[in-house]
Image (spheres, rainbow, N blue to C red):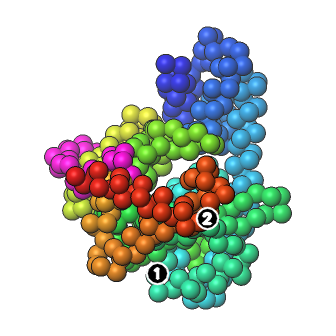
Amino acid sequence: MMRTAVDDFLAQALRGEAPSWPHRWQGSAATDLIVERVQFHGIALLLADMPAALAAWPDDVRAAVMDEARMQVLWEDLHLTMLRHVFDGLRDARVTGIVMKGTALAYSVYDPPAGRRRGDTDLLVRADQLDRVRIVLRQAGLVAAPTIFGVMYQEAWQYETCINTRHTIDLHWRVSDSAVLQLSCPAGEVLAQALPLPGLHAHALASSPKHTFIQTAFNRALHKSQGYLVGDIKVMSGDRLIWASDFDRLQRQFSDDDWAGLCQLALARGIAAIVLDAMRFARAALGAPLPAHIEHGLAAHTEDSGAARYLAEHDHVKRYLADFHALPGLGEKLGMIRRLTFPSSGHLRDRFPDMAGWPIVALYLRWMWRNWRRAFSVSS
């Protein structure tokens, strides 16, 4: 109950309502919870830019929020320096790079961009330019991170700053690593409809507003079913206020053509329910605009689609099977089997710490037996 009350209080503050500080919220436990929720929602700088909202807050809470906000600004400055070096290299290599999700939002609908807290930048490139992009990333001082188990269409590249902060670029050649979700947001379409993002770099492009909205809605839905890591703790929630802010800011900037394009795409791809749920969430949390004809049009087509079922699925084995069936062609299906059957040795050591001294062949056999047994139980 306390957590819900705190979240409601923070949403009121973001709406500019400057709610009075409840007298019952006293002591270190209440303070810790409030600071924890501000961090979870990723809204410290948004609150810091609304001094009237913080005026009546206790000094220790206000100081904690301001400290978090300053860290966001520092992170953004360092991240931007790294990104601009990367885009200088992409320009010189004649490679097109498109930023998606958080960074696309930060430099299109947030002022300052640091207001959109995030942990990395998602960069989409053409698959036939991957080798050139990897050279650019290495020349900019980034290092490829170990391969994440099961990931097929993206790589993590990391950069260490002079003050020991790590910055990550998630390099994509498909919009999503899920074959099911790729059908709703194809890479070729996103690349073809990308828009300039001069606030980031003269050579930078961003996914279009409708594609950014859809990816953010997918991200929210995935976190509702699969959880979101806050530090080392997994939280099952899709109601982070930073996502409500994303949707709100996008919806407030939508032209009539933007609304129509998003609605048409949602209906054509069978994702009306996911898009509408995001819009209604933003309206409930922050008063985001939602034209009646858009709401009614989407609400009339909220049948259970493959993407909606995938996003709501809690069982990762069932998601793997859905992605396997959605993959186009034998080659990609075999590639998925190989990645799932033969993970890295580091992943196996982490997965089976009780077999630390065993040869790697034994770990592979245990892995294969466990996964095939689970797959058989799901399909039978």
Residue under the point 74% across and 33% down: 64
**Residue under pointer 1:** 126
Residue 162 in sight from this viewpoint: yes
Number of numbered discs overlaid on the protein picture: 2
The answer to whether residue 264 shows anywhere in this view is no
Q: CA distance from mark 2 to mark 1?
A: 39 Å
Give the left or right position of residue 230, taking residue 74 as reference.
Answer: left
Which residues fall within the magenta stretch?
291-316
Residue under circle 2?
Answer: 359
Q: Is residue 347 above or below residue 45?
A: below
Q: Amino acid at mark 2?
A: Pro
Position of residue 213 in the picture relative to residue 346 (left or right) = left
Q: Tell me the SS state at disc 1.
A: loop
Residue 13 is situated, as x and y percent measured from the top left of the image, at 56, 30
Is 15 magenta? The answer is no
Q: Return the residue nearer the eye: 7 or 361.
A: 361
Is residue 307 inside the magenta stretch? yes
From this viewpoint, which residue is outermost toward the bottom?
93
Q: Residue at x 51, y 44 (%)?
A: 228
Residue under the image location 80 percent in, 58 percent down: 164
Looking at the rendered structure, the secondary structure element under dot 2 is: loop
Q: Position of residue 296 (x, y in %)?
A: 20, 44
Nearest the viewer among 263 and 120 is 120
Name the dominant secondary structure of the magenta segment: helix
Give the quadrant of residue 283: top left
Give x and y (percent) for residue 54: 67, 29
Q: Residues within 10 Å of mark 1 (few under 14, many from 20)?
A: some
Residue at 58% x, 60% y is 347
